[in-house]
Amino acid sequence: MRRAMGLAGLSTLVFTAGAGIAHAQAAAPAAPPAADPANTAWILAATALVLFMTLPGLALFYAGLVRSKNALSVMMHCVAIACLGSVLWLLGGYSLAFSGANPIVGDLAKFGLPGGRDAVSGTLPETVFFAFQMTFAIITPALIVGAYVERIKFGAVLLFSGLWLLLVYAPVCHWVWGGGWLAGLKVMDYAGGLVVHATAGISSLVAVAMLGPRDGFPKELHPPHNPGMTMMGAGMLWVGWYGFNAGSALAADAAAGSALVATHLSASTAGLVWAVIEKIRFGRASMVGVVTGVVAGLATVTPASGFVGPVGGVVLGALASVVCLHAVELVKHRLKLDDSLDVFAVHGVGGILGTLLVAVLASPMFGGAGYAEGMDMGAQAGVQVLGVAAVCAWSAVASAAILFLCRATVGLRASPEAIEDGLDMSTHGERAYQN
């Protein structure tokens, strides 16, 4: 009898203790979200790769395409934009893009990264997510440099680029990636067909229309002074684009691997197709032509990279070269706009093309990842068209307003004497090459 009572008492004690532990666990606050080490390591590497695209990749790519007396000025533009964009991203750009519930633009809740080192964004430390997105904010206005080389004032580059980052890039980034109105419509832009390439491409076209052409254009088109330098820059862009597109998965997972494969195949196909077109039309394939095709393929696959399969990457690369090459001829020879290094024709047209085609190539029947819940090919196509129209319109209007302000304050075009001497010496007092 005593034994039975003891067992009963022990059972009661165990039950009471278990209930107490369960109650304590329920009452305890949930553990704060923790960053995933593998994802963090990958995005740290991807951040370095995307910065590598601008410095030195884009700087070398553009510098090789201009005359030798302006090569250093192009590099200076890229370095200066990287410095300015980084500071502005901390002081407002990041917050305008990735905070708040407003569908048009964010607020300033993340001004100066108030969360500190312990804040988490998804599975990443917020500092890592901030830095990764910062490299996108650097390269996007730097892409526009290729449109206005050899004739713009350095002060105009700084003023335009800074205001453009805050008034064009950050709001569009919020629309698409920051929970804004296009995100609500389920627009598909994996790594920046709208946010990066459409904004930069349309703004480039506005800039060259307001700045005017280089002297002698279009009859006198000066050949690139160093195609080898351009090739080296293109190679760096290609490698860096792995971080650009595969990093946009924000995780070390299968989606990142799929985006990398689609990216590489699009670039490879586009380079081959551009070379074939040149061989048919001109009897030879040029180094500058092949690497221009590669960059066109990279820009075109960017919005689709995480949504399409390998075959989709090949299709996008082939179409990129055909469409972008025709766009180069349209802009320079028919519209007679001196988009000097073909920013609109390659990046703008390529990014828009990929943004539209992802609605088709994301279909599982083409090896794609499919659509968001409630969407099909037709509905997705409608959203993509709306996204392209809205982003292009805002980029054009806002860029024109910024350029008018630049013209009224620091001026836009360098003096004829400075242009004749070359911007390397007249603006910076240095030369890329010493005789």
Image: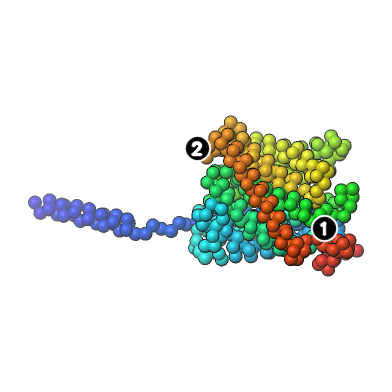
Task: Measuring from the top left, give residue 138's x and y in whole percent.
Answer: 67, 58
Query: Which sits earlier in the primary sequence, circle 2 or circle 1?
Result: 1
Question: Would you name the residue on which mark 1 appears?
Answer: 150
Task: Measuring from the top left, give residue 94's x and y in whole percent.
Answer: 58, 59
Q: Up-down: is 298 above or below 80?
A: above
Q: Amino acid under label 1?
A: Glu
Q: Amino acid under label 2?
A: Gly
Residue 414 seen in the current view = yes
Tags 2 and 1 touching, CB below 8 Å: no
- Residue at 87% from the left image edge and 38% from the top image edge: 282
Task: Measuring from the top left, give residue 70's x and y in whole percent.
Answer: 83, 59
Question: Would you name the residue on which mark 2 appears?
Answer: 374
Give how far apart the Cα atoms at labels 2 and 1 are: 49 Å
Q: Quadrant of residue 44?
A: bottom right
Q: Of residues 271 and 213, which is closer to you in this image?
A: 213
Regarding mark 1 in the picture, which secondary structure is present there? loop
